[in-house]
Amino acid sequence: MKKQFTFSRLLITGLLIFPLTAFACIPHSPNDVFIARFQAAQKVAKTNNHQLLTWTDSKFILRDLSAWFKYSNAQQWQSYFPTDIDNKIDPFRNLKKNDLIIGLAYAPDGNQPQNYRVTSFAYLKCQNNQITMSHPVSHFTAWDRKNKRCYGDHPKSIQLLDGFLKHDQSYYLKKLRAKYPTCQTLFSAFPKS
């Protein structure tokens, strides 16, 4: 009887703990991808790494129709990128007003679904009707399909749109290029302010 009780307790404990470990590594999904024009990053008082972000023309560009009903529109954008005192690793220090970026963001608090947290972004460029992206400015939780594991501090070989479960960045770049076949269509969708 005592062994059965111990096994039951162990089983219940395992079931309670497993969901926590199963969700410890949830990579982003295409629903988290947005494009926007950068306007400003304002540090929140008494913090080194919390910024309130201002974008114009922000759009989640890879969401399907069902996602538009599932997710709230972003009203506030925040980031918690690590920075040092000298701002040597501040991801915003090289951004200029109206720079076009592509990023990953999600709503971490179900009670405030309109508040989004930006986990990483890259510069989005278009020349000769070809969309290209820079390396991400910071690490983010990503799925490495080659090694079949999740990374929070992943190798530089993982690009911003590589970390999803199903497809890699080349697949999503093709989708972006189909949606915005010319630089003019991209710039018209995300005009400078």
Image (tube, grey):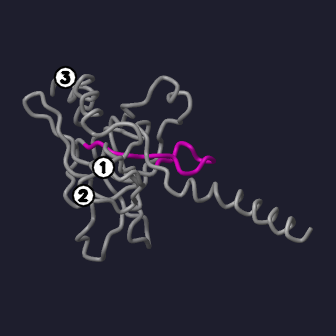
Q: Secondary structure at mark 2?
A: loop
Q: Nearer the viewer, residue 162 or 95?
A: 162
Residue at 52%, 25% in the rendered image: 66
Horizontal side of residue 108 vs 149, given as left or right = right
Give the amino acid type for the residue marked by disc 3 in the picture: Pro
Q: Secondary structure at mark 3?
A: loop
The answer to if 110 sits in the magenta stretch is yes
Q: Magenta span covers which residues? A: 101-116
Asked whether the residues under the numbered discs 2 and 1 touch, taking CB atoms below 8 Å apart as contact, a structural biologist would say no
Q: Tell me the residue that label 3 is attached to.
A: 181
Horizontal side of residue 26 vs 172, given as left or right = right
Q: Tell me the residue that label 1 is attached to.
A: 121
Give the amino acid type for the residue marked by disc 2 in the picture: Lys
Label 1 neighbour load within 10 Å: few <14, some 14-19, many 20+: many
Separation of marks 3 and 1 at Cα, in angstroms: 22 Å
Label 2 neighbour load within 10 Å: few <14, some 14-19, many 20+: few
Mark earlier in primary sequence (2, 3): 2
Residue 156: x %, y % from top left? 24, 57
Q: In what quadrant of the picture does the C terminus appear?
A: top left
Residue 157: x %, y % from top left? 23, 53
Q: Nearer the viewer, residue 64 or 163?
A: 163
Q: In what quadrant of the picture does the N terminus appear?
A: bottom right
Label 3 neighbour load within 10 Å: few <14, some 14-19, many 20+: some
Horizontal side of residue 50 vs 136, given as left or right = right
